[in-house]
Amino acid sequence: MPGYTQIVTSDIVRAVSKANTRSGLQDTAHLDREIAAQMVQAIQSVLDSGGKVVVDGIRQKSIVAAVKSAFPNVSTKLVWLDVPQDVLRQRYADRADKKDDQTFDDAYSRDEKLGVADLEAELRGDKSVDFVKHF
C-alpha cells in the first residue's frame, strides 16, 4: 500500500521463534507476549519516524488487544479479509516453501487452535472493523 510501511506478522513470529529455546517455544503464553511486544515495537518505530503502518496477518486476540492497548490515541482501522477456504487453499499451495512440510490443513488446524474463528466472531460486532469480501 503506497505511503504505508507493511509489518508482516509471520516475519515477527519467525524472528521470535528463532530467538527462543525449545522450552520457550512450548510456552505459548510467553510466545504471545513476545510476539505482541515485538509487534508493538515495530509499529512504534514506524510511528516515531512519522510513518503510517499496515499490519498484515494478526490472527490472535491477545495480539490484537496488545496492539490496541499500546496505541489508545492512534487512529486505527481493522480490516478482516473474508476469503473462501478454497481460495485460501490455492494461495497456500501457490506460495508453498519447498522446505516447509506443513500442509494447508495443518495451518488451518493451527488457526482453529489459536481461536481465529472466535476472534472473527468477536470482531464482527465491532463497528471499527471492516469485513471485506476478498478473492
Image (cartoon, grey):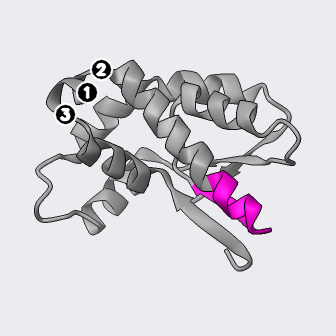
> What percent of the width, then of the height, locates residue 92?
31, 57
Q: Which residue is mark 2?
A: 27
**At x 24% / y 30%, what residue is drawn?**
25
Mark 1 and mark 3: Cα distance apart in space? 5 Å
Q: Amino acid at mark 3?
A: Thr
The answer to whether 133 appears left or right of 88 in the picture is: right
The mark total stands at 3
In magenta segment, residue 50: yes
Mark 2 and mark 1: Cα distance apart in space? 5 Å
Q: Amino acid at mark 1?
A: Gly
Magenta stretch?
Answer: 43-55
Give the numbered dot on residue 24.
Answer: 1
> What percent of the width, then of the height, locates residue 66?
64, 31
Give the numbered dot on residue 81.
Answer: none
Q: Quadrant of the N terminus?
A: bottom right
User: Is label 2 in a helix, a strand or a loop?
Assistant: loop
Whether residue 100 can be seen here: yes
User: Is label 3 in a helix, a strand or a loop?
Assistant: loop
The answer to whether 131 appears left or right of 81 in the picture is: right
Whether residue 135 can be seen here: no
Q: Which residue is mark 3?
A: 21
